[in-house]
Amino acid sequence: MKVKCLIVDDEERAHVVLKNYLQKISSLELTYATRDPVDAFNYLHENEIDLLLLDIEMPELSGLDLLSALEDPPKVIVTSAHSEFALESYNFEVVDYLLKPIPFNRFLKAVNRVLKLLQNESDSGPAETEKEPTDQYIFVKEDGINHKVMLEDIVYVSSYGNYVRIHTAKKMYLMAETMKNMDQQLPERDFIRVHKSYIVQLSKVEKYQSKSLQVGGQEIPIGNIYRQTVSQRMG
């Protein structure tokens, strides 16, 4: 499986160097590159990225401003010409901080850290006591208590920083989990990912348009990369 990468840097030279480095590593795939952090914010809002290669000093919005605006940021490697932001950047749990000009061996070391983290997350999988699904229910751990939630009661799931919110008709549960794991747990026959931040139960959809749908009285956007699948499933 390819690690999807996004480059955000206002320097053309940095794009040339990073694109060249990414092409040398077969496990990495550049899915988007931009010199505009606002454009990057919009892209991340609708697309799943595994690794963000991020400059710090950029016009209009700094790299750190961008990170603080993201609810659920991907793994981040900072690529900057300035060392003074290093300490602050680690408050955002960046994987590594690379100073320009970036040698390839240093870039490779940072990428290896990311690959190891992603592999560990993949291998760990969901904890059985709180995440093992059956045909009818899942257990949701909230405030140290495991709640049995029937799948038929789930209206939709939304991301909330490092948590997910599971919305039922009667209650909302806040759970330390990722959208990726939730997508894998919920049966595909009943649920569909419609956006980076939303999974909905098909039978609960009240209205449907090309760019949004309504479920549980909530208007939910449909991400660009999900529209074709949603259209096929909604029939």
Image (tube, rainbow, N blue to C red):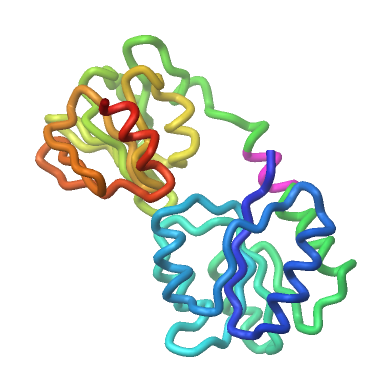
Instruction: Decide if residue 6 is on the left or right side of residue 26.
Output: left
Region in magenta: 116-121
Question: Residue placed at 21% from the left, 37% from the top?
Answer: 172
Instruction: Decide if residue 37 is on the left or right side of residue 101.
Output: left
- In the rendering, at what x and y percent does residue 47 appear? 46, 53
Residue 12 visible in image: yes
Quarter holding residue 98: bottom right
Give the quadrant of the C terminus.
top left
In the depicted structure, whether residue 100 falls above or below residue 89 = below
Of residues 164 and 36, which is closer to you in this image?
Answer: 36
Quarter holding residue 138: top left
Question: Residue placed at 44% from the left, 50% from the top?
Answer: 162
Q: Main secondary structure of the magenta part?
A: helix
Of residues 142 and 126, which is closer to you in this image?
Answer: 126
Question: Residue placed at 35% from the left, 30% from the top?
Answer: 192
- In the rendering, at what x and y percent does residue 165 appear? 30, 41
Question: Residue placed at 43% from the left, 88% from the top?
Answer: 60
